[in-house]
Structures are given as structure tokens and as C-alpha cells.
């Protein structure tokens, strides 16, 4: 009997998620997140055609775009705990199914109402899936927060940037408003059986991880003894406000790129080639994502990034009246670089300044304000276009946003002096998960110390 029990014991050995096809599941998780974001931004170069089919104006286009963003915001608030409580495989499969149905529904939308409802379905499903996908990558790559952050950023930002390009390419056939959406719906549906076959259900249960957020470029944390009981310190509140304002302004630019920019860019370049229009719309998004992968550090980042974004927006405003495609391309790339540098600095400073117990609420609040920048100003741009015309409205919009960025850059520069005098303790290390396009990646919780490739700063004055 004792021999039999000895032989039975190995059958009860616990299998960890990293022991069952880890590389394939990592790639599948990243591909799922990438494809979901592609589907959400597929319509960008198609909006000029959709205006004709749906009988809408520029305002209708901004409403169609914003319906996704607003649903995404609500979804992030409602589903923010799903990654910690619900089986990850169940969440991802459900999100893929809903997004596939919503994407297919866009191909046959007869009016603006139908289109907005299906876009809202996409937003809610993607909001539910993003935190879950990030949690899955953390589980499959334990102790490697830097790699998790980069994979999440590449998958989400890459999907947002690739969506307009893929949408333009798939629209080259005889059914430009059907083929792109149906093709992506089929791709999304094909990922469902792959996940069911390759990801065992019992290994996709959520695992409780430490609350500490690891940020490679984070400034030293404010000493716990200097934090007010029950509320954040003045330095933490300042960092939060600057991060939220930076996110709002930078995503205002992204919202424009993904909604009315294709029509405006087409008039500057004097082309109706949808792949080219999609590429132009994706320049800023792609430049931002690539910039955030760079190991930048220093107090210069936030004011310099905001100043760069302001200069780039002046260039975008001037490209229309001058009719200069070269200026448009240069300004679009520069805007992406400025946004990437500025938001990376502001986001990591805010999350490092708050008490660990307030990390989740701080990140959620920053994301909520940030996403509102992709919706509210863009709808205002739609109203302005109805009165002034697209070219004049875009010029006024870009100049106003540039002025706001310049003001915030001055405020950020002044804030450095205030925070440099704050007492600090050891910094948490790890990786940066900066926002990606209209879907920022989730900060990476980790208990591991800062990797050798990302040394912690020596003093408070060394970081934003």
C-alpha cells in the first residue's frame, strides 16, 4: 500500500503556468491583444467613405469614433477587477467573441446609431481584455517585468498604429467598407479555438500578485512618513495633476489622428489612396510607441516632451494652409516623439509619488482623464468643423492644443523645483508600461528589484 501511495504522489504535483507551452502562450496572448486593437482602429482611413454611406458629417465621424472611447472608459472602470478575479482564458475568449461580432456588425451598419452601438461593444470588450492580457503576460513571465512592459506596449501600441494601415490595405478591393471588417472578424474568431486548445483552463486562474508597481524610470518614492494619513502628499497630487493633464492633451492629438485626420491629410497630400492615408494617420502613434521603448531618464523629459509636442502641433496647423506634405510628415513624427517622452515621464512620476495603497486608483484616474482627451476635444472639433470647415477647424484646434502644451511645459518645469526638495526613500524598479495610442498598457506589478539595465536614480533631483 505504501508503494502504491508513493507512485501516486507525483500525479498530485502542482503544475505552474510557466510549465505548459509558455512561449506559445506568450505569443498568443500578445497576438490577441494586438489583433483586438487593430480591429478597434481599422475604420480610421475608412471614415471618408463611411461619411458617404452613413450620410453623416464631420460631427458624426467624431461621434462614431468617440463612442468607442467612451465605452472603453466605462469598461475600464467596470471591469478593472476582472483580471484579478475571473479566469483569464474565459475573459479573453469572451472578449474575442464580442469584438468579432461587433467588428462584423460595422460592415453592415445602415446608420450612425448602429455604427456607434457596435463600436461601443468593441470598446467594452477590449477594456475587459486588456488588463487580463497584461496579467497573463505577468504570470507567464514571472520576475521579468521589463519584458512584460515592452511586450504589452508593443502589442497594444502596435495594434493601434497598425489598425489604420491594415484598414487602408484591406479596403483596396471591390467592397472597401465590408472586406476590412469581415477579415478582422474572422481573424478574431480564429483566435478563440487557438486559446481554448493551447491555454489549459485550470492554469489560467488569476494569481494574487504584489501591489507594488515596477517602473524602470520612476523617481524615488516620497518617504512614507511624509505622506498624509488618508490622503496624498502635495507632491503626489501635483504629479497626478500634471500626468492627467499631459495624458489628456496628448490623447487629444491621438483622437484627432484616428478620426478626422484622414480627411484633412488627404486634402494636404491630394490623394484618396486609403493605405497612404492610413499610414499618415499612424505616424504619430507609431513614433510615440517606439519612443516609449527607449530607456530615457532625467528631469528634462517632461518639459522637453511637451515643448516638442507644442512645436509639432504648430507644424500640423501650418501644413494645411501651406499645402506641404513634407511638413505634415515631419510634424506628425515629431508629435509622436514629444508625446511619448512627455507621457512616459509624467506617468511614471505620478505612479511613483503616490502611496502603494493608492496605486490602482491613481492609475485608473489617470487613464480615465487621458481617454477623455480622445473623446471630448474631438467631439468639439467636430462641432467646430460644422461651422468653420475642416481645414480652418483643424488649424484652430492644433494651435489651441499647442498653446495648452506650452503652458503645461512651463508648469512642469516649475514643478521640478518643488519636488526636488521632497524627502525620498528607495525607488521601486522594473519596467515602464506607458500608454499606447488610445489604449495605454497596464503598469506592471512586480516584486523583483530594478534590473541591472535600469539602475535606480540616486537622488530626487535626478528624475522628474
Image (cartoon, helix red, strand yellow):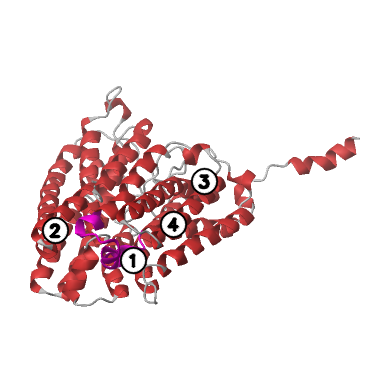
Q: Residue at x 30, y 42 (%)?
A: 368
Question: Does residue 163 appear left or right of residue 21 in this picture?
Answer: left
Which residue is denoted by mark 2 in the rendering? 385
The alpha-carbon separation of the residues under discs 2 and 3 comes to 40 Å
Kindly indicate the quadrant of the structure image that contains residue 224. Answer: top left
- Which circle's residue, 4 or 2, is located before the other in the chain? 4
Which residue is denoted by mark 1 in the rendering? 164
Which residue is denoted by mark 4 in the rendering? 36
Q: Residue at x 64, y 44 (%)?
A: 202
On screen, residue 8 above or below 272: above
Question: Does residue 374 appear left or right of residue 110 in this picture?
Answer: left
- Give the SS element for disc 2: helix
**How many other residues sit within 10 Å of disc 2, few (<14), some (14-19) or many (≥20)?**
many
Q: Which residue is drawn at 47% across and 61% down?
A: 185
- Give the SS element for disc 3: helix
On screen, residue 437 above or below 79: below
The percent coordinates of residue 66 (x first, y second) are 28, 51
The percent coordinates of residue 447 (x first, y second) are 47, 41
Asked if residue 20 is among those painted magenta in the image, a careful observer would answer no
Say the numbered circle drawn on residue 234: none
* Residue farthest to the top, as pictured: 229
Amino acid at each position: 500500500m505504501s508503494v502504491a501511495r508513493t507512485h501516486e504522489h507525483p500525479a498530485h504535483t502542482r503544475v505552474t503556468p510557466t510549465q505548459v507551452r509558455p512561449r506559445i502562450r506568450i505569443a498568443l496572448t500578445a497576438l490577441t491583444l494586438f489583433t483586438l486593437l487593430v480591429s478597434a482602429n481599422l475604420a480610421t482611413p475608412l471614415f471618408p467613405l463611411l461619411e458617404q454611406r452613413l450620410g453623416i458629417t464631420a460631427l458624426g465621424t467624431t461621434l462614431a469614433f468617440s463612442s468607442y472611447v467612451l465605452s472603453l472608459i466605462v469598461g475600464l472602470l467596470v471591469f478593472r477587477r476582472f483580471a484579478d478575479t475571473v479566469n483569464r482564458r474565459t475573459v479573453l475568449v469572451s472578449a474575442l467573441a464580442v469584438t468579432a461580432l461587433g467588428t462584423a456588425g460595422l460592415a453592415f451598419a445602415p446608420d450612425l446609431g448602429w455604427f456607434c452601438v457596435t463600436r461601443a461593444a468593441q470598446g467594452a470588450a477590449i477594456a475587459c481584455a486588456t488588463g487580463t492580457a497584461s496579467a497573463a503576460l505577468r504570470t507567464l513571465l514571472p520576475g521579468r517585468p521589463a519584458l512584460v512592459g515592452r511586450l504589452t506596449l508593443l502589442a497594444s501600441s502596435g495594434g493601434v498604429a497598425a489598425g489604420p494601415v491594415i484598414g487602408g490595405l484591406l479596403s483596396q478591393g471591390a467592397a472597401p467598407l465590408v472586406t476590412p471588417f469581415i477579415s478582422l472578424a474572422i481573424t478574431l474568431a480564429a483566435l478563440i479555438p487557438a486559446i481554448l486548445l493551447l491555454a489549459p483552463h485550470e492554469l489560467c486562474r488569476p494569481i494574487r500578485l504584489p501591489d507594488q508597481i515596477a517602473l524602470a524610470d520612476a523617481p524615488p518614492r516620497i518617504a512614507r512618513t511624509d505622506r498624509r494619513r488618508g490622503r496624498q502628499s502635495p507632491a503626489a497630487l501635483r504629479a497626478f495633476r500634471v500626468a492627467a493633464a499631459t495624458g489628456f492633451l496628448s490623447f487629444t492629438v491621438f483622437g484627432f489622428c484616428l478620426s478626422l485626420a484622414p480627411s484633412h491629410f488627404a486634402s494636404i497630400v491630394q490623394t484618396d489612396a486609403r493605405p497612404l492615408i492610413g499610414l499618415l494617420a499612424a505616424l504619430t502613434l507609431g513614433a510615440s510607441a517606439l519612443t516609449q521603448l527607449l530607456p530615457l531618464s532625467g528631469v528634462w523629459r517632461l518639459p522637453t516632451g511637451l515643448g516638442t509636442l507644442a512645436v509639432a502641433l504648430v507644424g500640423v496647423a501650418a501644413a494645411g494652409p501651406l499645402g506641404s506634405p513634407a511638413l505634415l510628415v515631419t510634424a506628425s513624427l515629431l508629435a509622436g516623439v514629444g508625446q511619448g517622452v512627455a507621457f512616459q515621464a509624467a506617468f511614471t512620476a505620478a505612479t511613483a509619488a503616490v502611496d502603494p495603497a493608492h496605486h490602482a486608483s491613481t492609475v485608473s484616474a489617470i487613464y480615465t482623464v487621458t481617454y477623455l482627451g480622445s473623446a471630448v476635444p474631438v467631439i468639439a472639433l467636430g462641432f467646430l468643423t460644422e461651422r468653420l470647415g475642416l481645414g480652418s477647424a483643424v488649424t484652430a484646434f492644433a494651435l489651441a492644443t499647442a498653446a495648452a502644451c506650452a503652458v503645461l511645459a512651463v508648469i512642469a518645469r516649475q514643478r521640478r523645483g518643488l519636488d526636488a526638495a521632497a524627502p525620498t526613500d528607495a525607488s521601486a524598479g522594473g519596467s515602464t508600461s506607458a500608454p499606447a495610442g488610445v489604449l495605454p498598457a497596464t503598469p506592471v506589478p512586480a516584486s523583483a528589484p530594478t534590473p541591472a539595465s535600469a539602475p535606480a536614480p540616486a537622488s530626487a533631483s535626478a528624475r522628474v
